Image: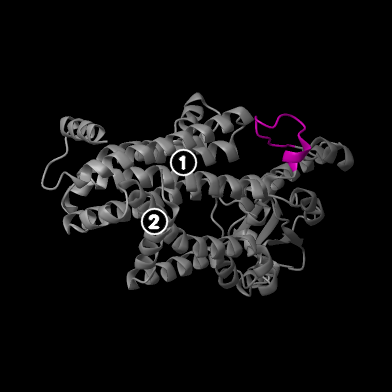
């Protein structure tokens, strides 16, 4: 059994030792600044790249064919209030030269010059700095094609009203197959889905980095104590299990001390992007069309749950493996088997991002050694049953508990293995000797 008092003292010592290090403090400040910069980057980019915000999404029409193109463009270039912005249609330029001057002065983004060829067919010339494949250029191209077809029908004797009815833009919706036809909740949750995709992507990367970084701290700390023979002295004052628990908890607290400010600053910066952009008078959606303010407590809760459980699981394994080696050079070789499972879970998470409802995604979420990395993409982007989530969490808790027990055994055996290379035979022999000693 654990002795809470001793575990607490050891954890406090590990925590205070880490947080007082200058490298720890500098790293934490750098992490906070980097995350703050990432959170505000879309706003800053929109501010300096969008000084012509009021006329950025606009096209000035020079209708030399006198075909009423400006008015007929408007329905085609209206935004949907979600993924497409409205392209403002203007008709103030009397010549192509005047339109080009408006573009140079920043009063318009592009100009559409309309002529009528010798065969009576409308022709269009778009003057713009945008790439040919940009979304706004494609929208204007589609609109011009429809207007040209309308004009051909009118020239053939069909009324303009009838021609416009033929080419009226259709209502076209895109839905996730997991939400079904006519799911009104999904229809208004595009921002939430984009934000959840982003948080699923970020959480998998953050989980991997945290486990590798702080797990290595644990392993190296154990090896350092063992190589300096401090472990022998500490074992006389506390049981190996207490030492293990205190070290894992202390370094986990140090890791959270470094991570939580970063997560708090980052979440605030991302969540209030729109509000900050409004205060600065810029349209951040032109740079990053994701509303992180649409994130739910459910998303944050699952992230914290799997993060803590995954950290305890791998932190205990790092401590147990670290106790079996006698020098820092052997740490990377000793943790190689764990890294294999971590890499499977890490790269599996990217597979789940693209296919969250496949059988492979389900098993990656259920298997405890990969679930800390793959569960978030599956939960946020897929459609897992409640029982599947419960099974994943229960298995992760049981595996983490088993890892602590196993690490405690390895920790006790490791005290006796100075100068020896760990092997399954020596581990079994020493484990048996300890059972007899009891």
In whole angstroms, how far apart are the C-alphas of marks 2 and 1? 29 Å
Q: Secondary structure at mark 2?
A: helix
Ranked by sequence position, the earlier of labels 2 and 1 is 2
Location of the C terminus (image quadrant): top left
Q: Which span is picked out in magenta? A: 172-187
Q: Position of residue 306 (x, y in %)?
A: 51, 43
Task: Establish if 238 lies above or below 398.
Answer: below
Q: Is residue 175 magenta?
A: yes
Q: Which residue is mark 2?
A: 6
Q: Is residue 241 magenta?
A: no
Residue found at x 40% / y 58%: 11
Residue found at x 56% / y 70%: 44
Q: Secondary structure at mark 1?
A: helix
Q: Residue furthest left?
A: 419
Tag 2 and tag 1, C-beta contact below 8 Å: no
Q: Nearer the viewer, mark 2 or mark 1?
A: 2
Label 2, residues with CA under 10 Å away: few <14, some 14-19, many ≥20: some
Q: Position of residue 108 (x, y in %)?
A: 67, 67
Q: Nearer the viewer, residue 45 or 433?
A: 433
Q: Which residue is mark 1?
A: 372
Task: Left or right? Give the position of 57 relative to 168.
Answer: left
Q: Nearer the viewer, residue 272 or 400?
A: 400
């Amino acid at each position: 059994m654990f002795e809470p008092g001793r575990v607490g003292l050891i954890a406090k010592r590990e925590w205070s030792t880490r947080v007082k290090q200058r490298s720890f403090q500098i790293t934490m400040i750098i992490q906070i600044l980097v995350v703050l910069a990432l959170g505000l980057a879309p706003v800053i980019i929109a501010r300096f790249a969008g000084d012509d915000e009021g006329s950025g999404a606009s096209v000035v029409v020079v209708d030399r064919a006198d075909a009423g193109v400006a008015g007929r463009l408007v329905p085609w270039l209206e935004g949907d209030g979600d993924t497409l912005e409205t392209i403002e249609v203007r008709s103030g330029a009397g010549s192509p030269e005047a339109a080009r001057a408006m573009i140079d002065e920043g009063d318009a983004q592009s100009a559409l010059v309309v002529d009528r060829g010798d065969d009576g067919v409308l022709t269009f010339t778009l003057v713009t700095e945008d790439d040919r494949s940009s979304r706004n250029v494609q929208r204007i191209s589609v609109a011009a094609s429809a207007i040209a077809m309308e004009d051909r029908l009118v020239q053939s004797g069909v009324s303009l009203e009838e021609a416009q009815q033929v080419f009226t833009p259709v209502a076209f919706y895109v839905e996730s197959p997991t939400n079904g036809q006519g799911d009104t909740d999904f229809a208004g949750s595009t921002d939430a889905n984009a934000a959840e995709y982003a948080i699923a992507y970020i959480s998998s990367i953050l989980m991997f980095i945290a486990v590798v970084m702080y797990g290595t701290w644990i392993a190296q700390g154990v090896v350092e104590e063992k190589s300096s023979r401090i472990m022998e002295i500490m074992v006389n004052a506390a049981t190996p299990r207490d030492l293990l628990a205190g070290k894992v908890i202390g370094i986990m607290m140090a890791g959270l001390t470094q991570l939580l400010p970063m997560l708090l600053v980052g979440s605030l910066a991302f969540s209030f992007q729109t509000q900050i952009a409004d205060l600065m008078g810029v349209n951040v959606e032109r740079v990053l069309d994701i509303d992180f303010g649409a994130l739910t407590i459910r998303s944050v809760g699952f992230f914290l749950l799997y993060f803590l459980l995954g950290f305890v699981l791998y932190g205990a394994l790092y401590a147990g493996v670290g106790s079996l080696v006698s020098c820092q050079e052997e740490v990377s070789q000793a943790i190689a088997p764990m890294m294999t499972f971590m890499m499977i879970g890490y790269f599996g998470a990217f597979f789940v991002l693209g296919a969250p409802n496949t059988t492979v995604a389900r098993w990656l979420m259920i298997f405890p050694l990969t679930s800390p990395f793959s569960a978030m993409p599956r939960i946020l982007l897929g459609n897992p049953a409640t029982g599947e989530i419960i099974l994943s969490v229960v298995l992760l808790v049981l595996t983490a508990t088993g890892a602590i027990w196993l690490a405690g055994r390895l920790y006790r055996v490791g005290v006796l293995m100075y100068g020896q290379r760990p092997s399954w035979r020596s581990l079994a022999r020493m484990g048996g000797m300890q059972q007899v000693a009891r």
